[in-house]
Amino acid sequence: MLRLVRLEWIKTFHKWRTYIGFAAIGFFLPLFFIAVKLGGETEAVKFHQFSILKEHFIIMGNLFNAFLVTRMLMMTFFVHIPFLIALMAGDVVASEATAGTLRMILTRPPSRLQLILAKIVISLLYTFILIMFMATLSFSLGYLLFGFGELVLVNSNQFAILTATESFWRCLLAYALAFLAMSVVAALAFLFSVLVENAIGPIVGTMTVVIISLIISEAPISLFKAIRPYLFTTYASVWMKAFSEPLPWQTILISSGYLILFMLFFFGVAYVIFQRKDILC
């Protein structure tokens, strides 16, 4: 099994499209942080409603820091991450079907279950590495350009100030929950990769499902209310709860549980289809 995972790792990271996600994040994150740095504190103050605090309090210290900008980044950039995930996870099985090598691989000793498990591990591992790359880059750029400091959480009813240490752990928790949400996207793209035999179909199918589900989950239309609990996008924004005070652990655990169930469901359906599929090329 470990040998299969290693072989899948080599095949995956020998494809140029595997690095598109890293290149995109490596380009846009510095651009985002530099733009925020040059744009000054004004836009961030508006973005996080600090103007409400400034009307009633004297604010001192480094509140415009790496953790604040990281939170801004996550709220802005995570809409686009599913595409980068689908770009790789949707190619894991479909690319071999397109190249005609899948049938030859299946004639060898490893069973279909072992093969599909190895590909699932690689899909999740890629998702984890991509999210951790984003986290590491955001913390590094944030520290170099803004430094660390307290994170101010503001909403319409209350505000809270987190220490720099707690802010760091909250951001890590947010990235961990984001990884869980993106793992569901990877599982969905993997399912489409098993269903079709070209590399474009899984990407289009995944993004179509994600966009339509997001619209239904977020649109303030009462007709969609009964559908929302059955969509994974309803729970995908659980990472935002990492910036709530106090932490709503019950909501976080319930949403995480649903995301895990969706992920297992998509991977399970993919396995059943792959197990019964006739490989003709």
Image (cartoon, rainbow, N blue to C red):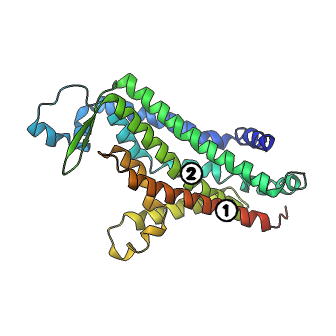
The residue shown at (40%, 43%) is 74
Tell me the quarter of the image containing the N terminus. top right
Q: Residues within 10 Å of mark 1 (few under 14, many from 20)?
A: some
For mark 1, what is the residue?
268
Question: Between disc 2 and disc 1, whose residue precedes?
Answer: 2
Is residue 132 visible from the viewing direction of this image?
A: yes
- Left or right? Give the position of 55 relative to 13: left
Q: CA distance from mark 2 to mark 1?
A: 14 Å
In percent of width and height, residue 33 lies at: 38, 32
Vertical arrangement, residue 270 with respect to residue 47, above or below: below
Judging from the image, what secondary structure is the residue with disc 2 in? Answer: helix
For mark 2, what is the residue?
183
In percent of width and height, residue 233 lies at: 46, 60
Near-viewer residue (155 or 64): 155
- Left or right? Give the position of 32 relative to 256: left
Judging from the image, what secondary structure is the residue with disc 1 in? Answer: helix
In percent of width and height, residue 83 lies at: 54, 51
Residue type at numbered disc 2: Ser
Vertical arrangement, residue 28 with respect to residue 274, above or below: above
Vertical arrangement, residue 170 with respect to residue 250, above or below: above
Of labels 2 and 1, the one closer to you: 1
Residue type at numbered disc 1: Gly
The residue shown at (23%, 48%) is 155
The residue shown at (41%, 68%) is 216
